């Protein structure tokens, strides 16, 4: 079996930690680490919905993603200074929002809004997948906060499932799980997989960066992604079961 530069096997996650309740102010929060990638996910609960949803008996969940200027090896300019949000930031923000809404019953949520902020403190590949995985934990706590405050019905079930995400890719001809930047930057195929805790796919983003991939390789990557997401689901459950 191929051994990687960091000693992992091809189907092994980097060390993953989830520090739930990291923010004292937010209704839900989690500091998640995928190896050296670290993302702070905070969930802000508001009683009320955007004007276009008022009176429809539904809630709303959305997300915003950002990267600190020195999250990478070289400082990047803050997008607020540039005066516009970059295309990559928009894309990832929308991906996180879609992933979370796939497991949210907006009617059970009631006319409440939850905004998830995913801020990358340190980037070493997989920032969007870490964001989605951590955002679910923050979202869960924000929903429970809303229930405790009486904004969500006691017996309502706003979450139909959990959600996590992981990267996979083909490196030197071999399928690999959870790519750090060193692997991601030279991957022949790069893919992000978003799944529910029950094993259903929400989104698959895959690109042949070098040589095209065949169906057998695609199947292997999907199998790796499913294994990785299942492992992450177990870690999410452990974090949510622990005392905050």
Image (spheres, rainbow, N blue to C red):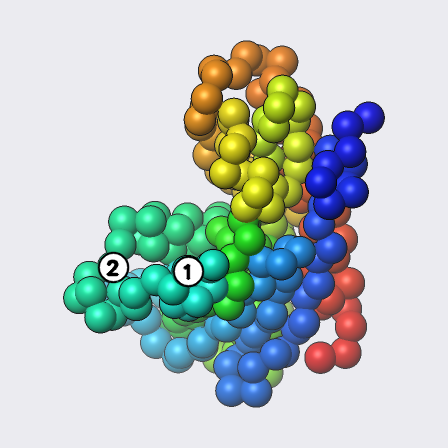
Q: Position of residue 17 (x, y in %)?
A: 71, 63
How packed mark 1 is, by other alpha carbons closer than 10 Å (few <14, some 14-19, many 20 or more), is: few
Direction right: furthest residue: 1
Residue 170 left/right relative to 113: right
Please tell me which residue lies in front, 190 or 62.
190
Q: In front of the other: label 1 or label 2?
A: 1
Q: Position of residue 176 (x, y in %)?
A: 66, 32
Residue 202 left/right relative to 66: right
Q: Which mark is residue 85?
A: 2
Q: Position of residue 27 (x, y in %)?
A: 53, 80
Image height of 100 relative to 209, above or below: below
Q: Is residue 70 visible?
A: yes
For label 1, the residue is 74
Viewport quadrant of the N terminus: top right
Mark 1 and mark 2 lie on one chain; the one further toward the N terminus is 1
Identify the residue shown where x is 46% and y is 34%: 205
Direction front: furthest residue: 74
Q: Secondary structure at mark 2?
A: loop
Distance (Cα) linking label 1 and label 2: 19 Å
Q: Secondary structure at mark 1?
A: loop
Please tell me which residue lies in front, 161 or 111.
161
Residue 54 left/right relative to 179: left
């Amino acid at each position: 079996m191929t051994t990687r530069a960091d000693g992992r096997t091809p189907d092994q996650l980097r060390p993953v930690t989830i520090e739930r309740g990291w923010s004292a102010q937010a209704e839900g929060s989690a500091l998640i680490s995928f190896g050296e990638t670290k993302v702070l996910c905070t969930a802000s609960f508001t009683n009320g919905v955007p004007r276009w949803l008022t009176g429809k008996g539904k809630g709303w969940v959305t997300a915003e993603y950002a990267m600190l200027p020195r999250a990478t090896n070289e400082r990047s300019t803050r997008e607020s200074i540039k005066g516009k949000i970059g295309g990559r930031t928009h894309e990832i923000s929308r991906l996180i929002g879609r992933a979370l809404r796939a497991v949210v019953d907006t009617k059970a949520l009631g006319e409440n809004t939850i905004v998830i902020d995913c801020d990358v403190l340190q980037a070493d590949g997989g920032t969007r997948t870490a964001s989605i995985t951590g955002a679910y934990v923050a979202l869960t706590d924000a929903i429970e906060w809303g229930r405790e405050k009486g904004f969500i019905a006691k017996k309502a079930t706003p979450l139909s499932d959990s959600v996590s995400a992981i990267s996979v890719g083909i490196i030197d001809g071999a399928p690999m799980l959870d790519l750090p930047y060193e692997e991601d930057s030279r991957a022949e195929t790069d893919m992000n997989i978003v799944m529910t805790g029950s094993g259903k796919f929400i989104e698959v983003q895959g690109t042949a960066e070098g040589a095209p991939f065949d169906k057998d390789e695609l199947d292997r990557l999907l199998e790796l992604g499913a294994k990785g997401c299942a492992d992450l689901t177990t870690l999410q459950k452990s974090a949510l079961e622990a005392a905050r």
